[in-house]
Amino acid sequence: MALNNLKGLSELAKAAKGKKGKEVLTVPVDDVVSKVQVRKRFRNIEELAATLLTEGQQSPIIVFPKNEEGKFVIQKGERRWRACKHAGIETIDLVVNDKVQNNLDETAGELIENIQRDDLTPVEIAEALNLFIEEGWKQKDIADRLGKNITFVSTHLSLLKLPDCVR
């Protein structure tokens, strides 16, 4: 039976050979440009910039292939790009999406990414922050670690004092 499994794995490896995944590139931030976006206000860029400096970039932005000027055009991830620029970070990780889309497809993609996001509730945030408190962290240290202000931390933690029926 073990030999049959090996044969199956061998066949799977052969089938996968030659199939290429998306490659993450690291390029200068200045090689990337913005386009007209659905989002008009870019909030909390300073906080995101601080987080990028302490944690690094956790996920690449998505861009279109280079344009006539030799620049990558942002498809998804403009807040991360702006935060990198704000923080003085010189390079950014990206994935090139070479799928051709019309303007409405691009707009739909932006909307889907932003309105389908299931953000944490304030109570979920509070419960997660409380894990740090239980480990002996001070609110200021939590705020610094997350790139948020202390008011954010204290306000959320105060939710844990509410009765369960209100939460």
Image (cartoon, grey):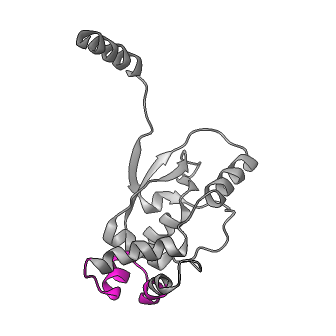
78 sits left or right of 13 in the view: right
39 sits left or right of 7 in the view: right
Q: Which residue is depicted at the point 57% across and 76% down?
A: 43
How far across and how far down the image is residue 63, in percent? Answer: 54, 50
* Along the viewing direction, whichever of 59 and 64 lies nearer the viewer: 59
Q: Which residue is depicted at the point 58% across and 60% down?
A: 118
Q: Is residue 152 magenta?
A: yes
Q: Which residue is depicted at the point 47% across and 73% down?
A: 125
Q: Which residue is depicted at the point 58% across and 48% down?
A: 67
Give the quadrant of residue 76: bottom right
When the figure is inspected, residue 15 is found, relative to residue 103, above or below; the finding is: above
* Magenta part of the chain: 135-155
How far across and how far down the image is residue 139, in percent? Answer: 35, 86
When the figure is inspected, residue 20 is found, relative to residue 2, above or below; the finding is: below
Q: Quadrant of the C terminus?
A: bottom right
How far across and how far down the image is residue 96, in percent? Answer: 50, 44
150 sits left or right of 112 in the view: left
Helix, strand or loop: magenta stretch: helix
When the figure is inspected, residue 21 is found, relative to residue 66, above or below; the finding is: above
In the orientation shown, which residue stands out farthest toward the right?
104
Q: Quadrant of the N terminus?
A: top left
From this viewpoint, is residue 70 visible? no
Give the quadrant of residue 37: bottom right
All told, the count of numbered labels is 0
* Along the viewing direction, whichever of 109 and 154 lies nearer the viewer: 154
135 sits left or right of 28 in the view: left
Q: Is residue 35 magenta?
A: no
From this viewpoint, is residue 52 visible? yes
How far across and how far down the image is residue 38, in percent? Answer: 69, 63
* Along the viewing direction, whichever of 112 and 72 lies nearer the viewer: 112
